[in-house]
Every structure is written in C-alpha cells, then in structure tokens.
Amino acid sequence: QLVESGGGLVQPGGSLRLSCTVSGYRSDYYTIAWFRQAPGKEREGILCMSRDETTSDYADSVKGRFAISRDNVKSTRYLQMNSLKPEDTAVYYCATATYFAPQDCTLVRGDYDYWGQGTQVTVSS
C-alpha cells in the first residue's frame, strides 16, 4: 500500500515536499517513481530511483528543480520540489515495482504495478 501526502497550494517559485509511505514489503525491495497528471493531459513520469539508489532518471521538465530521496527506517520516499511553476500544477502519484533489476528504473507508467491515491499540487499566485 502506498499513501501520499504533502500536496497543497504554493506560490510560483516556492517549494513543497511530497511523501510516499510504503507498507507491506521491505523498504529497500522496490523501485520508486513519481508521476503527475495535469487536467486534460496524460499521466507522465517525472522521476524514478532504482532499488540500489545508483540510478535515477528525470523528465526534462523537472531537472534541476525536483529531487527524490528515501528514508528506509520510515519506509518513506520523498519528492522535493523547488522553484515551482504554474505548469507544475497536477495530481502527483508515487508508484512502485518489485521486479526491476536493482540498478534500473523507468518513467514508463505501464512498468509500475502499485500506485498511491494521488495528492494535488497547485502552483498559483
């Protein structure tokens, strides 16, 4: 089970940190990714991190602004979002998969089999 939190309303240029708490299996046993879906658009992958944390991938739209991190003790994964823009407004989802090789991750929606419920992020003045 994945539970997200941390969404809300933020002004352009501001920051937010989203959390994704994972339960049901070992915290170091899965690959994590973050996706987002803006109104009227397809769900897009924006960040992923491999199980062994040696590999990460970022969508061009968030490079240099967003970062992913983990706290294995709390079984929580974080999405730190800085320099937010109005075009970052979307529902954000975390997703996991257990069958990737330890060093792999992707931004492909169909590669992930567990999803959180989503949390709304609105960037507006």
Image (cartoon, rainbow, N blue to C red):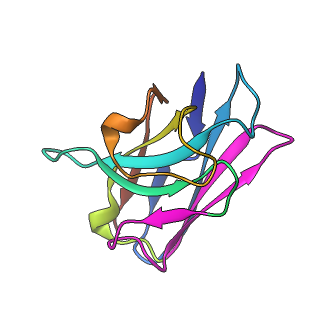
Q: Does 4 sit above or below residue 70?
A: above
State the quadrant of the C terminus.
Answer: bottom left
Extreme right residue here?
Answer: 73
Q: Quadrant of residue 4?
A: top right
State the quadrant of the N terminus.
Answer: top right
Q: Residue at position x 59%, y 30% from top?
A: 3
**Left or right of residue 110, residue 114 in this image:** right
Q: Residue at position x 26%, y 44% from top?
A: 43
Tag count: 0
Q: Which residues are magenta?
A: 55-82
Q: Is residue 58 magenta?
A: yes
- Of 50 and 117, which appears nearest the observer? 50
Residue 69 pos. (x, y %): 67, 58
- Of 69 and 41, which appears nearest the observer? 69
Residue 37 pos. (x, y %): 28, 45
Q: Is residue 74 magenta?
A: yes
Q: Residue at position x 60%, y 55% from top?
A: 103
